[in-house]
Amino acid sequence: MNLKVLMEGILVLIFALVTMVEGLRLILSKDPTVLHDPLGPGIYVLVLGLGLMAVSFAHFVTGRRRLPGKERVAASKKRRVQLFSSIGILALYILLVHFVGYLVATLTFFLLELKVSGVKSWRNNIILTLILTIIYYVVFVKVCGMVFPKGIFFD
């Protein structure tokens, strides 16, 4: 295993441990008068930390199996543009959720993200955006009982 793979795995493992500790802290210090979510955010953060830990271990295992003589192929410019566009769209989504709430932000997010991901037809893009937004709403709000942000403009 080379040093780069080892350092990447350790870094993700540290993030996983910090995330899990924060999740446990949120679970243990839950104030029912402040939280709208019956489970509290700690469970979600703890599950995210466990997922990061699994990714860290998978990275160690796959990094160990790489042959030292094999060269990696660099990503094309198109793929790099897609990656950075997706990161920018995610940052925009996080910002929009605060101001305009879940519904408008999610519709905007899926519309832009599906276009960046390669959905060429605007008709198909709009249909997929509506379907995904409705599915997320039904699963998380109706089934799981989560309260999604309404935004400062609609509060």
Image (cartoon, rainbow, N blue to C red):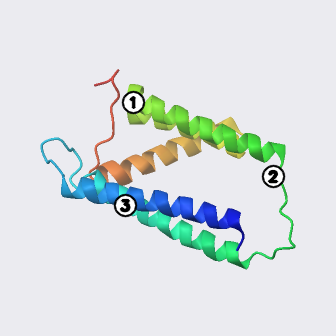
Could you say where residue 125 lies in the image, as x and y percent from the top left?
63, 40
147 or 31, nearer to the observer: 31
Nearest to N terminus: mark 3 or mark 2: 3
Q: How many marks?
A: 3
User: Quadrant of residue 148 in the image?
Assistant: top left
- Specify the farthest residue to the front: 3
Q: Alpha-carbon distance for marks 3 and 1?
A: 25 Å
Q: Quadrant of the C terminus?
A: top left
Characterize the local packing of mark 1: few (<14), some (14-19) or many (20 or more) Cα atoms within 10 angstroms: some
Q: Alpha-carbon distance for marks 3 and 2?
A: 32 Å
Position of 149 with respect to 82 (left or right) is: left
For mark 3, give the secondary structure: helix
Could you say where residue 19 lies in the image, as x and y percent from the top left?
40, 56
Task: Decide: is 97 above or below 147.
Answer: above
Single out the mark in the foreground, 1 or 2: 2
User: Quadrant of residue 71 in the image?
Assistant: bottom right
The amino acid marked with disc number 1 is: His
Could you say where residue 98 lies in the image, as x and y percent from the top left?
39, 30
Which residue is under mark 2?
75
Marks 3 & 1, CB-CB < 8 Å contact: no
Which residue is depicted at the point 56% across and 40% down? 110
Position of 4 with respect to 19 (left or right) is: right
Q: Is residue 143 visible?
A: no
Q: Which mark is residue 20?
A: 3
Position of 98 with respect to 1 (left or right) is: left
